[in-house]
Image (cartoon, grey):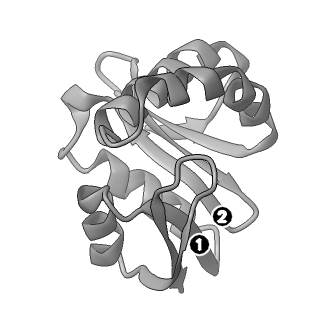
Amino acid sequence: MIRILQENDLGVVMQIWLDTNIDAHGFISREYWISNYATVEKMLPHAEIYVYENDDTEQIEGFIGVTDHYIAGIFVKAESQSKGIGKQLLDYVKGRKEELNLSVYQKNVRAVRFYQREQFFIRSENIEKETNETEYRMIWHK
């Protein structure tokens, strides 16, 4: 089931955010994600956040964050990845928007391939100042 974030979901969602970022971005120090935790936690309630809750266990297994037409990220627990949860979350948001864009690290090849498979195209690339890593800016149109 996909539903809107509830206040009592925040702790679980933030743990998924932290764990997933550390796992997916081995090229960025763990400390970077830990140091950004509090900032993200404050910003999260101001975005559109949709969680994927397992119908059987009633546990949150992933979420997507969107601000206007910008996808801040799709995060799925490691043990729940490659089961279609990310695609379901993305499709849910695609059903509500005419256009979406996002930034993804070039070195996160798995994510880049996922978004390309989902009809996103690389529009530009730049160097992120905080990490000095190359990011792709990707876009999707309905």
Judge whether residue 67 can be spotted in this image. yes
The kind of residue on which mark 2 rests is Tyr
**Residue 67 point in image, percent of width and height:** 73, 56
- Above or below for 66 versus 5: below
- Above or below for 86 versus 116: above
Judge whether residue 95 can be spotted in this image. no
Callout 1 crowding tier (Cα within 10 Å): few <14, some 14–19, many ≥20 = some
The kind of residue on which mark 1 rests is Asn
In the image, 12: left or right of 1? right
- Above or below for 16 versus 134: above
Residue at 70%, 20% in the rendered image: 38
**Residue 94 point in image, percent of width and height:** 53, 69
Q: Nearer the viewer, residue 113 or 117?
A: 113
Residue at 75%, 45% in the rendered image: 47
3D distance between C-alphas at marks 1 and 2: 5 Å
- As helix, strand or loop, the secondary structure at mark 2 comes to strand
**Residue, disc 2:** 70
In the image, 7: left or right of 34? right
**Residue 55 point in image, percent of width and height:** 35, 27
Quadrant in which the N terminus is drawn: top left
Callout 2 crowding tier (Cα within 10 Å): few <14, some 14–19, many ≥20 = some
Residue at 44%, 52% in the rendered image: 89
| Callout 1 touching callout 2 (CB < 8 Å) | yes
Q: Quadrant of residue 96?
A: bottom right
- As helix, strand or loop, the secondary structure at mark 1 comes to strand
In the image, 11: left or right of 109? right
Q: How many marks?
A: 2
Q: Quadrant of residue 57?
A: top left
User: Of the residues under marks 1 and 2, which one precedes in the sequence?
Assistant: 2
Residue at 39%, 18% in the rendered image: 59
**Residue, disc 1:** 101
